[in-house]
C-alpha cells in the first residue's frame, strides 16, 4: 500500500517556519479542494494525480520518496 507522509512533512514545515501550517493553506497554495487535502493528510488511501503529487513536492521542497512510501 502507498502511504502519504503529509503529517510528517507538515510538522517539519511548521517547525521551519515557526508557525502552524494548515491543510487548508496547503490546499489553497497548490490548487486542490480542502476536502481532498484532508483525505490525503488522514492517509485514507486517496487516489490523486501526478500533478498534485508534483505540486506537493514543490510546496514542501521534497522528493517523491519523502512524500510517499510503499508498505507491504
Image: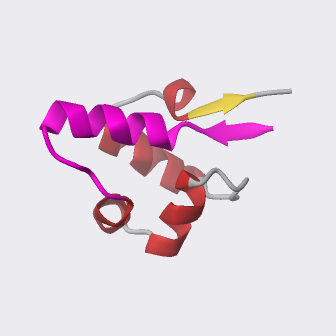
Does residue 47 appear in the picture of this structure? yes
Could you tell me which quadrant the N terminus lies in?
A: top right
Residue at position x 65%, y 29% from top? 69
Asked whether, in this view, residue 51 is left or right of residue 14, the answer is right
Asked whether, in this view, residue 21 is left or right of residue 44, the answer is left
Please tell me whether residue 11 is drawn above or below residue 32 in the rendered image: above
Along the viewing direction, whichever of 61 and 22 lies nearer the viewer: 22
Please tell me whether residue 56 is drawn above or below residue 17 in the rendered image: below
The spot of residue 59 in percent (x, y) is 32, 45
The spot of residue 61 in percent (x, y) is 32, 33
Residue at position x 58%, y 50% from top? 50
Along the viewing direction, whichever of 43 and 50 lies nearer the viewer: 43
Residue at position x 40%, y 36% from top? 9
The spot of residue 33 in percent (x, y) is 46, 74
The image quadrant that residue 44 belongs to is: bottom right
Q: Residue furthest right?
A: 72
Asked whether, in this view, residue 35 is left or right of residue 61, the answer is right
Look at the image and say whether residue 24 sits in the magenta stretch: no
Along the viewing direction, whichever of 2 and 51 lies nearer the viewer: 2
The segment highlighted magenta reads 1-22
The spot of residue 13 in percent (x, y) is 27, 37
Look at the image and say whether residue 14 sits in the magenta stretch: yes
Amino acid at each position: 500500500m502507498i502511504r502519504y507522509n503529509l503529517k510528517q512533512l507538515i510538522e517539519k514545515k511548521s517547525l521551519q517556519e515557526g508557525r502552524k501550517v494548515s491543510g487548508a493553506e496547503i490546499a489553497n497554495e497548490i490548487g486542490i479542494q480542502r476536502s481532498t487535502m484532508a483525505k490525503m493528510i488522514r492517509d485514507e488511501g486517496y487516489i490523486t494525480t501526478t500533478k498534485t503529487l508534483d505540486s506537493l513536492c514543490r510546496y514542501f521542497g521534497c522528493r517523491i520518496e519523502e512524500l510517499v512510501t510503499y508498505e507491504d
